[in-house]
Each structure stands twice: as C-alpha cells, then as structure tokens.
Image (spheres, rainbow, N blue to C red):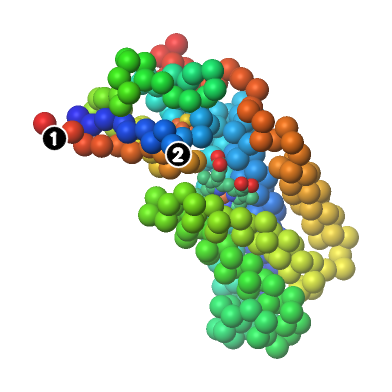
Amino acid sequence: MTETLWYAGRGTGVVSLVLLTIVVALGIGARSGRTAFGLPRFAVNMLHRNAALLALVLLAGHVGSLYFDPYAQLRLVDVVLPFTGAYRPFWLGLGTLGFDLILALVASSLLRHRLGARSWRIVHWLAYLCWPVALMHGLQTGSDGDSWWLRTVLALCAALVLAAVAWRLSSPFTQFPARVTRRVRALQETR
Amino acid sequence: MSHLHIDWTACDGRGLCAELLPELLAEDDWGYPVARHGKTQPTVPRHLEDVARRAVDRCPALALRLVNDPS
Ligand code: HEM
Ligand code: SF4
C-alpha cells in the first residue's frame, strides 16, 4: 500500500511536468496567433486550456498521494506554504510554490472575464516562473533525480520550452501572422 | 434575439471569433472581424447563441460581448 502511494506520487509528478511543458508550448503557440497541427486558433486555445486543467488534476493526485505516503512525511503546511518542509525543504518548497502558482494561473484564467484582460495577463506571466520552478522541483526533490530516464524526460521538456520561449522572443513572433486559410467550423460541416 | 458587441479598442485582430462564427463574421485583411451582413453589431440568431457565447469566452482580448435585445 505504502509503495503504491510512492509510485503514484512519482508517476503523476512526472506526467504533470510533461503536461505542463505542453501547456506552456501551447500557450505560446496560442499567443502567436497562428494555427497549428491543422487546427484553427480557437482549437489551439482550447487545447491549451484543457491541458492545463488536466495538469492540475494530475498535480492534485501527485500532492495527494505523497501527502498520505508515510515516508514523505508531509504536513499540511508543506502543501500550502513553501520552504517549511523537513526533507530537502528548498526543493520541496519549489514544488509547493509551483503548485500555488498553478492554482493562481488556473483560477485567474477561469475568472478572466471578471478580472479583465490586463490583470489576467499580468497573472498569466507567472507561467514563465512556474515552469522552471516545477522543473527544478522535479529534478531535485524525488528519488529519481539521478536516474537516466527522468533526466532524459526533463531534458526533452526543457528543450521544448526553451525552443518555444526563444521563438516567443524572436521578432517574427509578434509580426502579423502570415495569412493562412482558416478552417472554419460551419462551412466545413455543410460542405 | 441578441447581438454581438465588438469592443474595437480591445480587439487585437486575432480572428478566433471569425473562425467560430463564420456565418456572421468574416475577417478583413488584417484579421479583424467584419460582419457579413453589413451591421457593425451583428444580430445573433438563436441557433448561433451557444457558439457566440463560446466566441465571447475564448476571445483572447476579451473584446466580445453578447448583448440581449429586449423583444
Ligand atoms: C484554465 C487554465 C488556463 C487558461 C484558461 C489559459 C488561457 C490562456 C490564454 C487565453 C492565453 C492567451 C492566448 C492568446 O493570446 O491567444 C494563454 C497564454 C499562455 N498560457 Fe495559459 N491558460 C491557463 C493555464 C495556464 C497554465 C497552468 C500555464 C503554465 C504553467 C499557462 C501558460 C501560458 C503561457 C506560457 C502563455 C503565453 C503567454 C504569453 O507569452 O503571452 N497557462 N493562456
Ligand atoms: S476573437 Fe476577439 S480579438 Fe480576436 S478578432 Fe475576434 S474580437 Fe478581435
């Protein structure tokens, strides 16, 4: 039973980091205003949002299973307040901080219409802090930090996000997107 | 009935709305939505209200509003 919690905690942790990587890449892709994978813009946008919600669910599983894992010995404060834990407090704290940031990102996004575009955007920039925080937490806190497979997965994630951010910062990013023929919902259905 | 209000100072010309509501909106050459039937605030027929609400929800600039017309 206790082993199961540990495996579940590690598994959900790795998968949520991979998902978060995809979420960041899709967010940047949506921001670019381009279509991708043959999908229209609104679909890229929905994919970004739904992947974020899924990542949050997995993350709840990650925190939940490790909270009940007798070896990890987490207290309730460790789940909410960063840098107070007993075991590798700094790296564990990064995980807590990342979790708080994701809660803020998701909650503010779901309330986007009430917050207004400006405040929402400011909160959403925290995504660029959240991702590296989560990555370092994944690399340094757990039992798999030295294993080749975790390092490979994390290196691939880092490569994807670095490439996306480099593209985000490049000047063609903000230029008006090349006109592309758009896939349009109704006209497709009726044809 | 209701109509779609487009806040032109906020709209960023990203074209999500024209993708979702091709029956009502086309894009001009810069990606900004133009109503197909010449009105600046296109009337949304009932069968398109759900999609219109989705466009309002998804607009990255929060520039769209669905306004109910008293009948
Ligand atoms: C329910 C959750 C979320 C919703 C509804 C949401 C929605 C959005 C929207 C509407 C955009 C702007 C796209 C555009 O301008 O066309 C965006 C951009 C972005 N999102 Fe999210 N998001 C969510 C969660 C997250 C999370 C959890 C992360 C990462 C940790 C994230 C990372 C990003 C990034 C990196 C961008 C690009 C920002 C930029 O460079 O301007 N999002 N998101
Ligand atoms: S989705 Fe919003 S920002 Fe994009 S063109 Fe339509 S109104 Fe403008």
Secondary element type, mark 1: loop
Outermost residue, top side:
A191
Quadrant in the picture for residue A6: bottom right
Q: Quadrant of the N terminus of chain A?
A: bottom right
The type of residue carrying mark 2 is Ala
Where is mark 2, residue-wise?
B10
Q: Is mark 2 within 8 Å of ligand 2?
A: yes
Question: In which chain is the residue bearing label 1?
Answer: B
Where is mark 1, residue-wise?
B70
Position of residue A164 in the picture relative to residue A81 (left or right) = right
Whether tag 1 and tag 2 are in contact, CB under 8 A, the answer is no
Q: Is B64 situated above or below A114?
A: above
The type of residue carrying mark 1 is Pro
Question: In which chain is the residue bearing label 2?
Answer: B
Please give the name of the residue rendered at 74% of the width and 36% of the height, measured from the top-left corner. Answer: A171
**Is the residue at mark 1 from the same chain as the one at mark 2?**
yes
